[in-house]
Structure formats: C-alpha cells, structure tokens
Image (spheres, grey):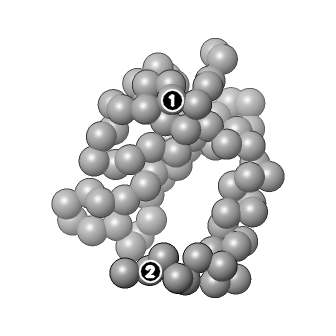
Amino acid sequence: MNAYNGIPATELGDVTWQKSRRSNSIGNCVEMARLSDGSIAVRNSRFPDGPALIYTQAEINALILGAKDGDFDNLLG
C-alpha cells in the first residue's frame, strides 16, 4: 500500500486506531494508527471514513514531545 496525505482512512486497511483517553463521549478527538511501514496515520474521529494524514515517526515524536513540553499550551481552549 502506498499511503499518502489525504488518503481515505478506509483505504488504509486493517489498522488499529487509537484515541486519547481525554476524548469526549461525542467523539471529538483525533485518532492515530501505526501503519505497516512505521508511519503514523491521523484522522478526525467525527469523520472516520474521511481523509487521513500520514506522518513519519520523527514528525509524530516532535508533535507529542512538543505537546508534553507545553509548546502548544496557547492553543488550549
């Protein structure tokens, strides 16, 4: 499979989507899945059949570690 940015999430096959424990009951959350090539797919849980964005492991590391460091605290509502 050649995953690309904007690929329909349904075309990614049998992947295991994971969302944050902080997700609310109406599904407002981002979900992530590890793909067979080691990249990470990201989708909007409200539109599970919609497009998925594909990131490298290094890009996801930078995002998660930056969030842990507070780099995005200014975006909290």
In this picture, residue 71 sits left or right of residue 7: right
- Residue at x-position 70% and y-position 39%: 39
- State the image coordinates of residue 44 (x, y, percent, origin top left): 38, 47
- State the image coordinates of residue 74 (x, y, percent, origin top left): 52, 82
Q: Mark 1: which amino acid?
A: Gly
- State the image coordinates of residue 9 (x, y, percent, origin top left): 44, 30
Q: Quadrant of residue 77?
A: bottom left
- Residue at x-position 34% and y-position 48%: 45
Q: Residue furthest right?
A: 58
Q: Looking at the picture, tell me which residue is in the foreground, 49 or 73.
A: 73
The disc label shown at residue 34, or none: none
- Residue at x-position 51% and y-position 29%: 6
Q: Judge the density around disc 2: few (<14), some (14-19), many (≥20) Cα neighbours within 10 Å.
A: few
The disc label shown at residue 6, or none: 1
Instruction: Please give the residue where the numbered disc 2 appears in the rendered image.
Output: 76
In this picture, residue 14 sits left or right of residue 64: left
- State the image coordinates of residue 50 (x, y, percent, origin top left): 36, 32
Q: Residue furthest front?
A: 74
Q: Quadrant of the N terminus?
A: top right
Res 68 visible: no
Res 37 visible: yes
State the CA–CA distance, disc 2 to disc 1.
26 Å
Q: Mark 2: which amino acid?
A: Leu
Q: Judge the density around disc 1: few (<14), some (14-19), many (≥20) Cα neighbours within 10 Å.
A: some
